[in-house]
Amino acid sequence: MGRSQSTALTNIRAMCAAHKLDSTKLLTQTKYLLNCYRRACWDTTGRCEPFDDDQGCYRDGHLLDALDYLIRFDPEEGSEVFESTIRTLFETRWMIDLVDNAMIRVKEFPDHGDIYFEIISKCYLTRFKYSEREILDILNLERSRYYDRKKEAVMVFGISLWGKEIPKLKRFLEECDTETFEAMA
């Protein structure tokens, strides 16, 4: 089996199919998100005020709209619209929680989870941006193996986010809205 069709990548694509995710689109969506994460996260986290009433956040239709946008995001639209939309999620700290939860899932991934976690963290999430050489040295990987693992890591992160965490949060928000509506009736 050649490098482009590794067992890990084949398994990851099967997972995409199981979650009804287009693997090519997922890879692009995830790269967009990860590429703007550091900038958007560090830009907004310092300005965010803690919420006094978490229930108010749950009922915010704007958040539900933003999650729906993330689910439908078409990479062909361009990164400016995407980054603008996810800033809303960062400002409410929901995107940070989503990313944190997805990263826990990445770390727990049975094959290379620890390596995937380190790659995503050092390439996209930490305040300090590591060079390729530093990452190769830290992970003790050859360059070609690193790029294989990086692609796999991005896809596993995407499955964790779009396949698990976003749908879970969306269900939670919809249940909160339903409970609120029923309580008012």
Image (spheres, grey):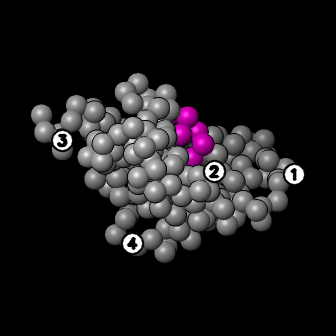
Q: How many marks?
A: 4
Q: Measure the C-alpha gap from mark 2 to mark 3.
A: 33 Å
In which quadrant is the C terminus drawn? top right
Residue pointed to by mark 1: 52
The disc label shown at residue 128, or none: none
Is 5 placed above or below 75 here?
Answer: above
Using the rendered view, name the quadrant where residue 13 is placed: top left
In which quadrant is the N terminus drawn? top left
Sequence-first tag of 4 and 1:
1
Q: Measure the C-alpha gap from mark 3 to mark 4.
A: 31 Å
Is 76 placed above or below 121 here?
Answer: below
Q: Residues within 10 Å of mark 1 (few under 14, many from 20)?
A: few
Q: Residues within 10 Å of mark 4 (few under 14, many from 20)?
A: few
Residue depth check, mark 2 versus mark 3: number of the one nearer the observer: 3
Majority SS type along the magenta span: helix
Q: Measure the C-alpha gap from mark 4 to mark 1.
A: 35 Å
Dot 1 falls on a residue whose secondary structure is: loop
Q: Is residue 155 visible?
A: no
